[in-house]
Image: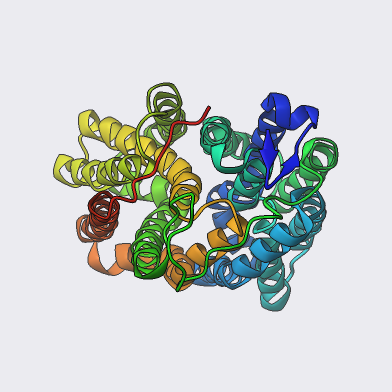
């Protein structure tokens, strides 16, 4: 394979499986330790530090906000210096941030650690990993991205139960220290040994908003701007829903009348459902344009929440909710990597993902705290109705994007070879 006139002869790029497995392992560990563990540990943090839950979730929200501001800059660093260097540095900083969080004794140290953790996560989680695959495979990275997200879907399934079990033997501080050490020991060697050493697409001129469409057919001008706005809107609204649910799913399910054990059971269904959706996409969706996958997956999310609302605590509908939400969430991770690649191309890919993340940083950051307040003051049915409305609007934006691409004749998707 050749990227921008530079033949890529590394074993990882030729075979691909070593790179995908390495990134899959680091994404499972990264999302589990840096993100999903918080949902289980937050009550213990609140009790330990002796303040209201709003301060605990507020630190998480502020960290997400800082991470959103950092995302475009992180993307530019990754494009400039390559994923091997930046993801290796990022995993060390992430481990240090987890350790600092475990030592927090008050508001300042807790908030500082949370901000550091979410900022450095932009160097090691999906956006960085998708860029690594694009640097290795260029415009044909879709299948590799699908395989990576297939593995990454196990993060919540593994880390929610694992963290719950560890919490029976240790406090939240010890667990974060275990995760800090384990993440660095696992991720640093894999990043150093298996990630692409350089950066991608060095010889291709980037497309700017005022340019005519490129020879490869990537969007430019007003069509590019419109696609960016619709995509950023959809990602932002879905980001609010996913951010809120990552912290409050178990609380939400218990609020609908399910026991803690049953809520964990339904929550654990989300991970396998993500994997199932990604497996179906990988096996049967390679000839489907990513924008089509985007709006179909987007429509499943409000459908799932509607089932939960209308089911009113019925287990027979809570299961389908978890499945629909999980499949949608799983496919949306693929969409986040493949649609920008389809529409905008591999040049400046890392920076583009960062720019797409930035517009929704405030609502994603506010989601855990806002949804907690919403559930307390408006009730479960109304709060879940808001999730239906937000995810439904995101699905509509993705549908408009797909129709616009089709009408403009720029649906240039080609099945990867």
Quadrant of res 281: top left
Q: Position of residue 169 (x, y in %)?
A: 70, 38
Name the residue at the bottom extreme: 108
Res. 166 in view: no
Residue at point 51%, 33% (across, down): 146
Q: Position of residue 15 (x, y in %)?
A: 70, 24
Residue at point 74%, 50% (across, down): 83
Please tell me which residue lies in front, 1 or 358: 1
Residue at point 29%, 30% (across, down): 319
Residue at point 71%, 67% (across, down): 116
Please tell me which residue lies in front, 199 or 237: 199
Res. 88 in view: yes
Q: Position of residue 261 (x, y in %)?
A: 42, 33
Quadrant of res 383: bottom left
Please tell me which residue lies in front, 210 or 79: 210
User: Is the residue 103 above or below the residue 175 in the image?
Assistant: below
For this view, does 163 lie left or right of residue 289? right
Please tell me which residue lies in front, 89 or 50: 89
């Amino acid at each position: 394979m050749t990227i921008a006139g530079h033949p890529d002869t590394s074993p990882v790029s030729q075979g691909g499986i070593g790179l995908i497995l390495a990134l899959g392992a680091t994404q499972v560990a990264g999302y589990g330790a840096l993100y999903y563990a918080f949902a289980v540990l937050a009550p213990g943090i609140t009790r330990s530090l002796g303040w209201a839950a709003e301060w605990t979730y507020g630190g998480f929200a502020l960290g997400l906000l800082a991470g959103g501001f950092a995302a475009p800059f992180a993307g530019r660093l990754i494009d400039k210096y390559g994923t091997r260097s930046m993801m290796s540095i990022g995993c060390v900083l992430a481990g240090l941030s987890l350790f600092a969080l475990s030592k927090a004794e008050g508001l300042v140290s807790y908030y500082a650690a949370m901000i550091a953790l979410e900022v450095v996560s932009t160097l090691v989680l999906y956006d960085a990993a998708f860029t690594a695959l694009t640097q290795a495979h260029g415009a044909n990275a879709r299948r590799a991205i699908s395989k990576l997200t297939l593995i990454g879907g196990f993060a919540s399934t593994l880390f929610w139960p694992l963290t719950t079990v560890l919490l029976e033997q240790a406090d939240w501080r010890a667990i974060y220290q275990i995760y800090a050490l384990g993440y660095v020991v696992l991720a640093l060697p894999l990043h150093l040994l298996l990630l692409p050493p350089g950066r991608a697409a060095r010889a291709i001129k980037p497309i700017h908003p005022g340019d005519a469409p490129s020879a490869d057919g990537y969007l430019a001008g007003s069509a590019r701007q419109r696609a960016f706005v619709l995509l950023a809107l959809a990602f932002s609204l879905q980001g609010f829903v996913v951010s809120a649910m990552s912290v409050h799913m178990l609380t939400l399910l218990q609020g609908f009348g399910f026991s803690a054990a049953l809520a964990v059971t339904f929550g654990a269904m989300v991970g396998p459902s993500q994997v199932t959706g990604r497996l179906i996409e990988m096996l049967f969706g390679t000839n489907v344009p990513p924008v089509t996958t985007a709006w179909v997956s987007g429509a499943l999310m409000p459908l799932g929440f509607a089932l939960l609302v209308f089911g009113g605590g019925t287990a027979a509908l809570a299961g389908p909710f978890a499945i629909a939400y999980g499949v949608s969430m799983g496919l949306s991770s693929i969409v986040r990597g493949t649609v920008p690649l389809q529409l905008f191309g591999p040049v400046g890919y890392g920076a583009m993902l960062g720019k797409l993340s930035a517009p929704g940083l405030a609502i994603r950051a506010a989601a855990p705290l806002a949804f907690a307040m919403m559930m307390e003051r408006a009730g479960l049915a109304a709060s879940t109705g808001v999730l239906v409305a937000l995810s439904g609007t995101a699905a509509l934006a993705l549908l408009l994007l797909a129709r616009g691409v089709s009408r403009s004749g720029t649906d240039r998707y080609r099945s990867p070879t």
